[in-house]
Image (spheres, helix red, strand yellow):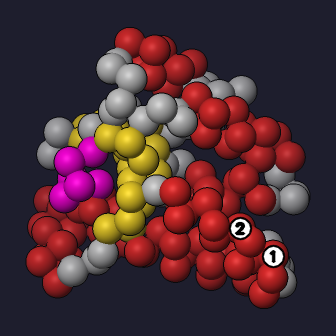
Amino acid sequence: MLNTKAINLIATRQMRDRVFIDTNVFCYLIDRKDIIKTKQAITFFKSIRDNDIHVSTQVIKEFCNIAIRKLKLTDLELKNQIQIFEKLTISDTSCSLIKEALHIKFRYQLQFYDSVIIASAIATNCDILYSEDLNNGQSIEGLKIINPFKD
């Protein structure tokens, strides 16, 4: 079931929030082994389609790595799947962003790559970060974190 808090937050906010989406949410769109989360991911993406959606190059690289290693997609399947990112705003991971990620990592005691995702979301002025990997409801540097798969 889609996170009811996420639905309520989406319903009460302006129609065009700037949202950043972590890798795992995209992976569930194509995960043939977890049908429940795949359905949740599809419902989630339909619910946020009017928002300004952002990702970083890190998200795309991680998505490709997971699709190859864990989901066993072929070359052609993966090339077809990454077309979803062409419709989104993509930011680069610069050295200055890495420095900010290090600040976030040590200040909040987070994993490094999670901190890079958070720093990317903050740098692109996003209001919400959707991720399964972080604490649902947590706010970091003004960025609201929501797990779209949590009830």
Q: Does residue 42 appear left or right of residue 116 in this picture?
A: right
| Residue at 44%, 22% in the rendered image | 10
State the SS at label 2. Answer: helix
Q: Is residue 85 above or below residue 139?
A: below
Residue that mark 1 sits on: 77
Question: What percent of the width, then of the height, locates residue 112?
Answer: 32, 73
Cβ atoms at labels 1 and 2 below 8 Å apart: yes
Numbered marks: total: 2
Marker disc for residue 55? none
Q: Quadrant of residue 137?
A: top left
* Residue kind at label 1, given as amino acid type: Glu
Range of the magenta residues? Answer: 121-126
Viewer-proximal residue, 124 or 118?
124
* Residue kind at label 2, given as amino acid type: Gln
| Residue at 77%, 59% in the rendered image | 30
Please say whether residue 131 is one of the residues in the magenta stretch: no
| Residue at 62%, 81% in the rendered image | 65
Residue that mark 2 sits on: 81
| Residue at 53%, 64% in the rendered image | 86
Which quarter of the figure is the C terminus placed in?
Answer: top right
C-alpha separation, residue under disc 1 versus residue under disc 2: 6 Å
State the SS at label 1. Answer: helix
**Whether residue 72 can be seen here:** yes
